[in-house]
Image (cartoon, rainbow, N blue to C red):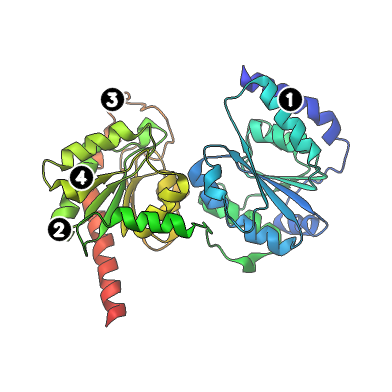
Amino acid sequence: MMPRLLALALFYYLPVVSTDQNLSMNSPHNTLSQMNQIEAGRICILKPSALGDVVQSLPILPALKARFPAAQISWVIRDSFANLLEGHPLIDEIIPFNRNSSVRYWWNFLKDLKQRQFDLALDLQGLLRTGVMTAATRAPWRIGMESSREGSHLAYNLTIPETSRTVPAYQKYWNVADAFGTEETGRDTQIFISDADKAWARDILSAGAKSCPTLAIHAGAQWITKRWPPESFAAVGAKAIRHFRCNIVLVGTTDERPLTSQIEKLLHKFVPTGRVLNLAGQTTLKQLAALLMETNYLLTNDSGPMHLAAGLGTPVTGIFTCTSSLRSGPPGDQLELVSTNVDCAASYQKRCPKRGPQNLCCMDELDVTRAWQALYRLITRQNAQRDSQAA
């Protein structure tokens, strides 16, 4: 029902937005040429989800601020992710929305976007929902990416072309920043964490064995085809404890609590209870970020926390089954990304095309040994770098 209503809303706004300038971009040169014409005092970024995508799109902010230093920047984001953006010095306003609300809520939300009188709307999501939001702003400049889908491109009057459809996801956001002519702003993911959240994380982690490294484990993922088995995570965690005397912190959402409880129970068969801390469902996003910043390593599926940790500079071992580590992995050199070798690898299918949801062949192929070897390489490399710096 909701997709139909969103489509109707898009076509409701199209007669209005189609009457103004229509700037069709065919090359990066033309994009930069048209971008130089823009004047904007009020900017709306539309990037509601998901967590990893929001993290990867954060380098857009310094680019926009460099190009429009006096502009007020607003960010439309799902209410469940809004906490991550709180306190960011380059964001003047966070506009949260509830994805599963009523038709009346949506109508009022779109009306509110129009009343804010934005000069520029930048759709970094590129789906029907954000296309409707972009059209609803009625901003003179409505910009989207060439990879947009579901008809969202109909809301744009300027489209940023893609250099290649095989580039990593983070590179697409960097290309948007470059289109504003601000390459010098860098690629850093700026996540601002309060001193209180940092202190909370240090305090909670101090309960583990002293002077021992901390390995965070995130075993959740939005798709079942991205979830490496909890038994496998527990086995790698146990090896990390034996070889490197790691403390283990299990992180995740409230819905992932049963999963982390299973891992916790399995780990307690091999290690002292004081070595394992289960914090799934007990943190805000900012507290999760603080935890990941204070931990030494993260072992994770392809997920939002993977990108969050990488953006904070925490070394990551990532497990990739149905997704591609090249397309979906984070940037950085403190990474060990392990991919399955089955013929349907990187298919981005939410259901297994071969065996069904309870017996995924990629999970069998990417075994504990391969994941442990990746984590072992990461930890030993970090130890060697630390020893070299101390010498």
Q: Name the element at disc 4.
A: helix
Q: What type is the residue that disc 1 sits on?
A: Ala
Mark 1: few/some/many CA within 10 Å (<14, 14-19, 20+): many
Judge whether 29 appears above or below 252 on screen: below
Residue visible at 72% across and 25% down in the picture: 107
Circle 2 SS class: helix
Amino acid carrying label 3: it is Gln
Numbered mark located on residue 377 in the image: none
Dot 1 and dot 3 residues touching (CB under 8 Å)? no
User: Mark 2 sits on what residue?
Assistant: 243
Q: What's the mark number on residue 9?
A: 1
Q: How far apart are marks 2 and 1 (CA)?
A: 58 Å
| Residue contact at pointers 4 and 2, CB within 8 angstroms | no
Where is residue 375, by image quadrant?
Answer: bottom left
Of 203 and 177, which appears nearest the observer? 203
Q: Closer to the camera, 1 or 373?
A: 1
User: Nearer the N terminus, badge 2 or badge 1?
Assistant: 1
Q: Mark 2 or mark 4, which is nearer the start of the sequence?
A: 2
* Residue holding disc 4: 368
Q: Distance from label 2 to label 3 (Cα)?
A: 32 Å
- The x, y position of residue 54, in whole percent, is 54, 47
- Where residue 242 sits, quadrant-wise, is bottom left
89 lies above or below 17: below
Q: Indicate the amino acid at tag 4.
A: Val
Q: Total number of numbered labels?
A: 4
* Marks 1 and 3, how far apart at CA: 39 Å
Which residue is denoted by mark 3 in the rendering?
Answer: 358
Q: Residues within 10 Å of mark 3 (few under 14, many from 20)?
A: few
**Mark 4 and mark 2: Cα distance apart in space:** 15 Å
Disc with the residue nearer the chain's start (3 vs 4): 3
Label 4 crowding class (10 Å Cα cut-off): few <14, some 14-19, many 20+?
Answer: many
Callout in the foreground (1, 3): 1
